[in-house]
Amino acid sequence: MKKIFNKEFKEKYMPDPSKVHEILYKDCQEVMKNRLITIIVVALMIFPSLYAWFNIEAFWDPYGNTKNLSVAIVNQDKDYEFKNQKLNFGNDIVKNLKENRSLDWNFVNSKTAMEGLNTGRYYAILTIPKDFTKSLMSVTQVDVRKARIIYTTNEKTNAIAEKITDQGANKLQVKISNHLIQVISKTSLGAMGGISNMTDDITPKLTEMKKSLQRLDAQLVNSKKLAENNKNMIGDLDKSLASSKASLDAIKRTMNGAKKINDDIGSMATDATSGIQNSSASLKSALRDVSRILESSVNLAQSLNSIGDKGAQQAVISIGNIKDKIDQAAIRVNNISQVLNDINVVNSNVLNNAVTRLNNEYRSLTDASSRLAGIIDQVNSTSSLTYSQVQDIVNIVADSNKGINDIISDFDDLVTRPLSRVNGNVSTITGDIRSMVDSTGQLYPSVNNFINTASTLNGRVGSSITILESSIDILRGQVSDSIKMIDEIQNNKDLKAFNNVIKSNILERADFIKNPVEIKEEKLYKMANYGSSMAPFYSVLAAWVGVIILSTILSTEPSKQYRSIDRYLGRLSFFLILSLIQSIIISTGDLLLLGVTAKEPVLFILILMLCSIAFCILIFTLVSCFKTLGKGIAMFLLVIQIGGSGGTFPVQMTPTFFRTINSVIPFTYGINACREAIGGVYMQNLLGDIGALLLFAIIPLIFGIMFKEDINDLLEPLSEKFEKSFLMH
């Protein structure tokens, strides 16, 4: 019994190498002898490579040729006057776009643009409305209106072109926002610079006043000495009094000069107060803009209730939009915090509470963004959006909006009033000096009357001189106090520090507020071009198509005189030789003809050869076992692998079915292995891909050896019906 089983096993499952070699030799001899078959076989070996090369060349650098996509620009913007300066952001946009070559910008009127969009000449229209600049500059006013650019597309022309023009419109929006932030920042910092210039102008005037007061003090000393001499020289009293009167007139002129200088300083302080108020208004307006962004996010979050768990992809997009608005709000809050922090440095930390509140809100916004990213991952993972997740999103956005509104409510206490103290100190000092000068001026009539009286009352000269000396001492004390006040102003460390910060480069600070973060891109496995990135997909696809063509045109069954297993392995060997030649032509053509850049070119050729071996065994086994039905299965596998392999788009972006089959189809591992050879090898990934390809070769081979004969017998009636048909073979 055992001998009979062993004999049957060897007869059915053990191939005869000589028979296999004989079948292969006859196939090769047939190709060499028959010229027509030779031409057909050569064409079969070359045709798959053409499929790969044409597609790779077509996708070599598609995004580098976007300059040929025509977009119409319609500028209807009107001039707007701001701070005695005419602004027209629409003209600025047109000027920048004329220097931009990313798209084919066409500057036309509205009628021409719409006609071009309908005919397909233009892929999109960007219309800048009449009130564009006016709306942008409303950020400096109480009522803020968002500026709009009307973006019109014709989606039927081309799906990808619409996405590219949409990306161009988004980039334009970012550039406009950055430009507006830079203008407002320069205006705010310029107002602070006005305070700095005011202090610079005050310094020489204070020095001049100090010198005048010092001269006044010297004259008072001389007057006192003169009075003392008059005590000893009563006989010369009239002459001395006349001299004192002349000195007093000089004193009056000096005090009048000091009063004028002090009035100039007071006027500058008033201008500084106006600058502070304008700066505070701009910052508060920027916070209101953040609040409006968050309010729109609240509305968008509440609309998620209508999506439910049947629109997971739409939910991901909507949540992503909410996250983008949260990120935008966080950037603006951080910018405002930076401006206040610079001002806080020079004001004895009087804005500590404001800076702390804004920093806390910035951290809250970044935390909210992270939580939204987590919810996006959950929705992608489960392909559903739950009610609790919607409520979490609504609560996240509502809490963020409440924090901003609380800061806006407390803005005057946190920012405006502390900033006003910078100018308030100067105003207080100038007021004190003016009071001193006025008090001193009030002494002049008294002293003058005293001198006149003394001239007529020689008998009371001694007592009058004593009174005069006392008045001079009082006046000298007031002059000394004024000099000390001027010294305090000139030596104020906070004022000097404020000057140093504000007088630094305003343009650099405005640029920092516009772009506080720079993204440094580092590519781990850099691809030279888009064509090289697409080469793995189209090369592997061409290898599969090549084997399908072979199995469709060439017969998988040699003469019936051989055993089933010998026929299977003999003809499979011939197919393997042809498929290997196909893969060599495809891979070497990619490298030499197209210029595909591969870090490991030899490995790329070997990997594609391995793919051809696995594909050939799999497809040949299907066709050899199931005949025409096997060809249909091979075509079905081709169709689902194009979408499920992640060759063009990340498989995570595809529907659940394709994500599910991704790990069980050979395309996935063939494409990934080719990417390792082109971009750079990560050995762990490469070995896993090679192992998977070997399994896709070994399992069909064993299946064909074990079950081909039985399956052929089972499907024989069906095969006969196909052979009798005039439509199938």
Image: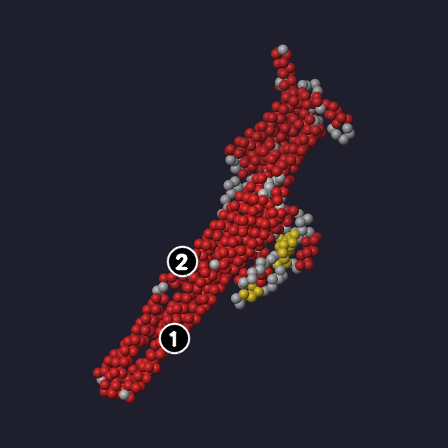
One can see residue 14 in this view:
yes
Q: Residue at x 65, y 29 (%)?
A: 619
Q: From what the image shows, is residue 575 above or below residue 383?
A: above
Instruction: Name the side, left or right, on which 118 lies relative to 211.
Output: right
Q: Which residue is mark 2?
A: 349
Q: Residue furthest left?
A: 232
Amino acid under disc 2: Asn
- Decide which of 568, 590 is in the foreground and name it: 568
Q: Residue at x 45, y 59 (%)?
A: 414
Q: Residue at x 47, y 61 (%)?
A: 412
Other residues around mark 1 within 10 Å, as few (<14) / some (14–19) / many (≥20): many
Label 2: element kind: loop
- Decide which of 325, 581 is in the foreground and name it: 325
The image shows residue 56 at horizontal and vertical percentages of 62, 40
The image shows residue 209 at horizontal and vertical percentages of 36, 72
Other residues around mark 2 within 10 Å, as few (<14) / some (14–19) / many (≥20): few
Amino acid under disc 1: Lys
